[in-house]
Image (cartoon, rainbow, N blue to C red):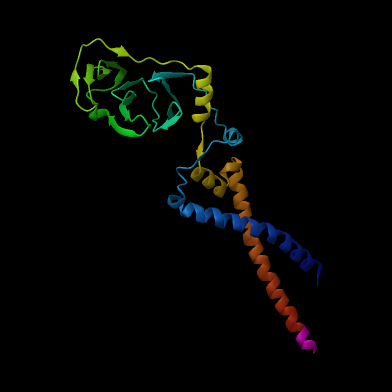
Amino acid sequence: MSHTSRVIRKWHGHAGVAATLFLIFLVITGIILNHEETFKLDQREISTPWLMRWYGIQAANPERGYLMDNRYFSWEGEKWALGDTPLAGNAEQPVGAVTVNGIHYVATSSALYLFQADGQLVDKLEKQALPAYPVLALGKANDSVVLQTTSGMMASIDGLTWQKTSTATTWSAAQPLPADVNRQMTVLLAPGLTLERILLDVHSGRIFGRYGPWVVDAAAIALLLLGISGVWIYVRSIKQVKQRHKHY
C-alpha cells in the first residue's frame, strides 16, 4: 500500500466518524423540523439564561403593572401575565387594565383584550371593531368599562356595545411592582425562544454566530470529499484484488 493510500485511508476513517455523527444530527433535526406541527415546536419555548445570553437577549425586568382584583397585570416585550397566569400578549405596550363584572380588560392603543378570570382570552377587539381608536386610557365607572379615545369617552357593560359617556371614571394607572411580585414576574416574563427557532438555527449553523453557516457548509463539503475518497478507496481496492488474481 502506497503512502498516499495510507494517508487517505487514515483521514477517511477519522473523518468518517465525525461525518457520521454530523449526518445523524442532520437527520434527527431534519425529521423533527419536518413534523413541527406534531411536536408543536412553535409553542414550546426555552428561556434558559445562558441561551438568552448567547443570543444577546436581555433578561426581563418588569418594574410596573396594573392592580386588578388583588393581582398584578404586568408585561415585558410581547409577554403578558396576570398574577401567576400567562396571557395572550401583544407587541404593543398596554395603556390600561381593569376588571369589570369578572372580566379582565387590557387595552393597547389599537386593541382591547377581554380575559376570563383564569386567563383565557374571551375576545379581542381591534381598530375598526373598537368604538374609536387610538385608545388613550382605560378605566371603569360603576359596572361599565370606559375607553378614553381621541373621539371622547366610550362606555360598555360587556365590551361589545358602546356609547358615549361623561360619567366620572376611575382610570387605571400603572404602579411600581412590589418586590415579591417583581421577582415572580421576572421569572414568568423571562424572554425565550421557540424550539422551532432554536432547531432551525442549529440546523443551519446560525446558532454559532455569523460564521456558523460557513462551518455547516464546510462540514457539507467534507461529507462530499468523504464520499469521493470512499469511492476512490473502493476502486483502488478492486484494482488491487484484480492484480493479485493475475499473479495466481
Residue 136 or residue 75, whichever sits in front: 75
Question: Which residue appears at 23% of the width and 29% of the height?
Answer: 128
Look at the image and give the residue range highlighted in magenta.
244-248
Number of labels in the image equals 0
Q: Quadrant of the N terminus?
A: bottom right
Residue 246: % across, % down = 77, 87
**Residue 6, relative to residue 151: is it above or below?**
below
Residue 16: % across, % down = 68, 61
Q: Quadrant of the C terminus?
A: bottom right
The quarter of the picture where residue 85 lies is top left
Main secondary structure of the magenta stretch: helix
Residue 122 or residue 6, whichever sits in front: 122
Residue 4: % across, % down = 78, 66
Furthest-bottom residue in this view = 248
Q: Is residue 130 left or right of residue 36?
A: left
Residue 146: % across, % down = 26, 18
